[in-house]
Image (cartoon, helix red, strand yellow):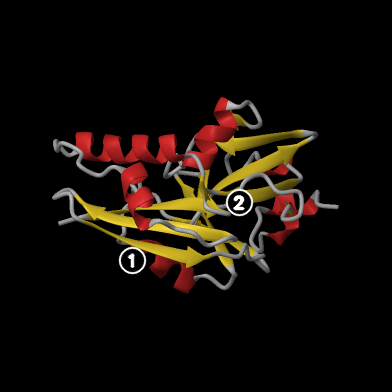
Amino acid sequence: MSQFIESIKVEDRKIFMLDLHQKRVNETFSHFGHENPVDLALIFKNLDHQEEGLYKFKVTYGLDGKFRTQMIPYAISEKADFELVENNSYDYSFKFEDRKEIERMKQLSRAGEIIIVKNNHITDSSYSNIVFKKGKDWFTPKSYLLNGVQRQHLLQTKKIKEAEITLQTLQDYSHFQLINAMNNLDDLLIYPLSKIRNLPKKAASEEF
């Protein structure tokens, strides 16, 4: 039976974007025709987490309603470089625990992180949605693999916009950054497009 995960930000005992995480859990159960018994707020409350600092609250659950939890100290890490990896058949529309195909793609890469390209369109990195900078604005690909909670939140609050981003239009952007439940827009972790090792030649030639 498939297992699913939610990775939720907890900082100084405060839990973030719980409504969006719960919505995704509800939609997962509904899609597979099951009633949802997994109440994230209740699970967190029962943990009685009292530690200060930044943690990843990981809930792994199945459609039978059984779950397990981990509270993992978290530190944001910088990536040395990135590589575009093409995979036209990969589907990650639900947050499955099984990430074997993603790990296979990473192992075949020569870079610290991958950016998955599907049918010529930019999607996500191995663990995050991506936003690209054009002028003063940030854009996220319409062609995501997983509609992450941070992505949804930033769109709802109008801090980012959606755009069709392809291999040919990467040249329109100057920088990018990774966003997920643990990582908001962060001025300290913005990467120039040149951090992508195998940029299409036209985009690479216009870097500065």
Residue for badge 2: 178
The part of the image, by quadrant, that contains residue 82 is bottom right
Give the mark, 1 or 2, whose residue is nearer the N terminus: 1
Instruction: Determine whether, in the image, residue 69 is placed left or right of residue 157.
Output: left
> Residue at left 59%, top 69%?
112
So how many labels did they put on this image?
Answer: 2
Label ID, residue 149 = none
- Vertically, is 51 above or below 165? below
Residue 124 location, x and y as percent?
51, 49
Residue 31 location, x and y as percent?
22, 35
> Residue at left 41%, top 54%?
87
Residue for badge 1: 100
Instruction: Check disc 2 and report its element: helix, strand or loop.
Output: strand
Q: Mark yes or no: residue 164 visible.
A: no
Residue 189 location, x and y as percent?
72, 55
Instruction: Determine whether, in the image, residue 173 is placed left or right of residue 181.
Output: right
Identity, as a three-letter code, of the amino acid under mark 2:
Leu
Graded by Cα atoms within 10 Å as few (under 14), some (14 to 19) or many (20 or more), the crowding at tag 2 reads: some
Identity, as a three-letter code, of the amino acid under mark 1:
Lys
Report the front residue among 116 and 71. Answer: 71
Instruction: Determine whether, in the image, residue 156 is placed left or right of residue 38.
Output: right
In front of the other: label 1 or label 2?
2
> Residue at left 57%, top 53%?
11
Residue 96 location, x and y as percent?
31, 54
